[in-house]
Amino acid sequence: MEQNEARQESLTREELRKAQKHKAKQEREEAATSEEKPKRLKWRTRLIPIWLRLIIILGIMLVAAVAGAMFGYGVLGGGNPIDVLDKSTWQHIIDLVNKE
């Protein structure tokens, strides 16, 4: 008799475990069905197109290079910063670099 009671007890525990799993599964399914479906992603319209961004970046790089050359020639080199924009200044620099 004790064996039958042990079997019933183990079956009862097993049945209880199955019932708990079934209940958890039902709760997950209810939660999944009650949630709204995710909205479709909309295409984001760019305010500034990529090609324009590249042109802007190149322009900023050019301005930074000219400003750096003017700072270096005028402040560090002791010359007139506007002279950086003269062709003769660059020709003189090229002649100094390529001196043989």
Image: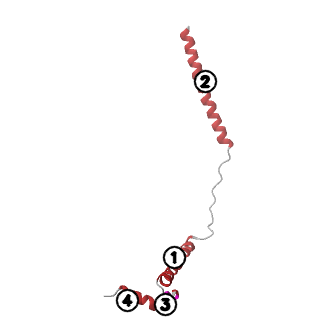
Q: Quadrant of residue 48?
A: bottom right
Residue, disc 2: 16
Q: Earlier in the sequence, mark 3 or mark 2?
A: 2
Which segment did they paint magenta?
82-86
Question: How far across and how far down the image is residue 85, in percent?
Answer: 50, 88
The reply to whether discs 4 and 3 touch (Cβ–Cβ < 8 Å) is no
Q: Earlier in the sequence, mark 4 or mark 2?
A: 2
Question: How far across and how far down the image is residue 33, in percent?
Answer: 66, 42
* Closest to the observer, 90 or 50: 90
Left or right of 24 on screen, residue 98: left
Q: SS at mark 1?
A: helix
Q: Residues within 10 Å of mark 1 (few under 14, many from 20)?
A: few
Residue, disc 3: 86
Q: Residue at x 57, y 74 (%)?
A: 52
Q: Earlier in the sequence, mark 4 or mark 3?
A: 3
Q: Earlier in the sequence, mark 1 or mark 3?
A: 1
Of marks 1 and 2, the one in the foreground: 1
Of marks 4 and 2, the one in the foreground: 4
Residue 79 painted magenta? no
Marks 3/2: CA distance?
A: 91 Å
Q: Earlier in the sequence, mark 1 or mark 2?
A: 2
Vertical relation: 13 (above or below) 99: above
Q: Residues within 10 Å of mark 3 (few under 14, many from 20)?
A: few
Residue, disc 1: 61
Left or right of 66 on screen, residue 18: right
Question: How far across and how far down the image is residue 44, in percent?
Answer: 62, 63
Vertical relation: 3 (above or below) 48: above
Q: Quadrant of residue 16?
A: top right
Residue, disc 4: 95
Residue 83 painted magenta? yes
